[in-house]
Amino acid sequence: MISRVFSILLYLISGVFFYGVCLFSVIDGISLPLISFVAVLAILALVAGLAIMRFQDWRRETGIVLLSATGFTTFLFLWAFVSTIPTDTSRFFGNPMGITVIVVLALAGALLVMTSRRPRTVA
């Protein structure tokens, strides 16, 4: 029971770091070493959470973390643009790598969740 709580806490920390990767990749002027450092922290937290649970359902857990981080990032971007409607968007979305990172992480998360489904058995 306590190990499950610990792994969920590490998944939450990993999701925050993956959110940081998505956010930093969109903002123009953020250096690649900073994005890479945050990505390494996200992966380490995710692997630590998976290791606590002995890598049971690792595809589903990893997919959920990635989908949550990218979904939260997308929601915040849409909310910020709808509520403030900025006139100068060159600081945000000035880096074309940002949207690519978000889409790749979302697709990877979706594929991991879809491939983690167990086949149906007829009783």
Image: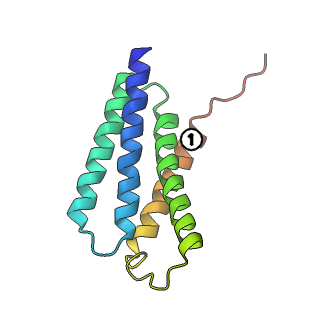
Quarter-wise, where is residue 46 in the image? top left
> Which residue is the extreme one toward the bottom?
87
State the residue lying farthest toward the front: 84
Residue 27 visible? The answer is yes
Q: Where is residue 75 drawn, in percent x and y?
A: 55, 59
Depth check, front residue: 88 or 31: 88
Three-letter amino acid code at the position of disc 1: Val
Look at mark 1 in the image and give the residue it sits on.
113
In the image, taking residue 48 as reference, residue 122 lies left or right, namely right
Q: Decide if residue 55 is on the left or right side of residue 67.
A: left
Measured along the vertical axis of the image, is residue 2 above or below residue 15? above
Residue at image coords 47%, 59%: 104
Percent position of residue 81, x then y: 54, 72
- Front in this rendered view, residue 37 or 116: 37
For label 1, the SS is: helix
Left or right, 58 with respect to 25, comes to right
Q: In screen coordinates, is 112 left or right of 93?
A: right
> How many numbered badges does the structure rendering display?
1
Residue farthest toward the right in the current orientation of the protein? 123
> Residue 84 location in percent, x, y?
54, 74
Q: How many C-alpha atoms fall within 10 Å of the one at disc 1: few (<14), some, or many (≥20)?
A: many
Q: Quadrant of the N terminus?
A: top left
At x 47% / y 47%, what residue is drawn?
66
Q: Is residue 17 above or below residue 93?
A: above
Q: Residue at x 36, y 55 (%)?
A: 20
Question: What color scheme is it?
Answer: rainbow
Q: Position of residue 74 (x, y in %)?
A: 53, 61
Q: Residue furthest left?
A: 33
